[in-house]
Amino acid sequence: MKVLYFAWLRQRIGIGEEAIDPPADVTTPRALVDWLVAKGGGYEKAFADTSAIKVAINQEFADYDAPIGKGDEVAFFPPVTGG
Amino acid sequence: MAVRVQRGEFDVGAELKALTKGNPQIGGLCAFTGLVRDVNDGASVSTLTLEHYPGMTEKMLERIEAEANKRWDLEASLIIHRYGTMNPEEVIVLTAAASSHRGDAFAACQFMMDYLKTEAPFWKVEDTGDGTRWVDSRDSDQEARERWKD
């Protein structure tokens, strides 16, 4: 699974992108966040308040309860501020 | 229809001229240009840097432009959005819509900009001289987008 982080999430975690192989029970972005946060460090700081963090699955906005699997690209980022 | 995401500067006048060239059906062209300001939320801004999500950005901009063309009768449309580091007065974004008459051009241009503000994955970080700070999203942008809901 490919996971991407943007803006201040990327800064807090320290990387913009990583390939991960989470356990089989990580089937939603919510479970993925819990698994990442358990690793501690920057993840814990970055995901302290997920109400301020959007999620996209395969480059489409998605919910934290949407299904994710091995081949998916999951991205986490703050609300967008372009324009 | 065209969408471009690029680092470099561009000439708004030349882009608009190219957009309408060869199409005498166009009677109205409406364009919005977003520029870097030197002050935001009370602090001076020396440079502004935009980060984006390559792939998703283009996908979302193309979708916004296609939706504008579905809702209004347009002869031509264009979205250009820059990323990277910019100075005050530089152009960040251009949305343009051309139609036979002004009504559709005005509405489509504003629609594309309002949707882009809340749907296109760009993030701004300002350098204020005392360090950098990520720009917060504004509720007013969300409200501007909501008014286009059917």
Image (cartoon, coloured by chain):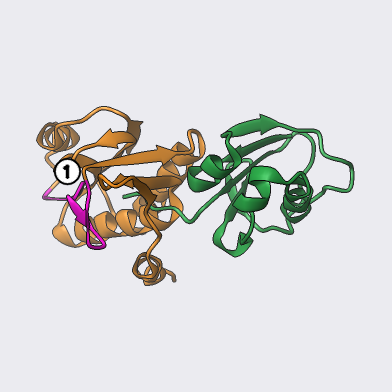
Q: Which residues are magenta?
A: B27-45
User: Can residue B76 be found in the magenta stretch?
Assistant: no
Task: State how many labels appear.
Answer: 1
- Residue B85: quadrant of the picture: top left
Q: Nearer the viewer, residue B29 or B119?
A: B119
**Left or right, residue A48 beside residue B139:** right
Q: Main secondary structure of the magenta part?
A: strand
Shown in green, the chain is A
- What residue does disc 1 label? B88
Please give the name of the residue rendered at 41% of the width and 70% of the height, measured from the top-left corner: B146
Element under disc 1: loop
Q: Nearer the viewer, residue B82 or B31?
A: B82
Quadrant into which the N terminus of chain B falls: top left
Please give the name of the residue rendered at 14% of the width and 32% of the height, measured from the top-left corner: B11
Q: Nearer the viewer, residue B34 or B146?
A: B34
Q: Position of residue B144 (x, y in %)?
A: 34, 68
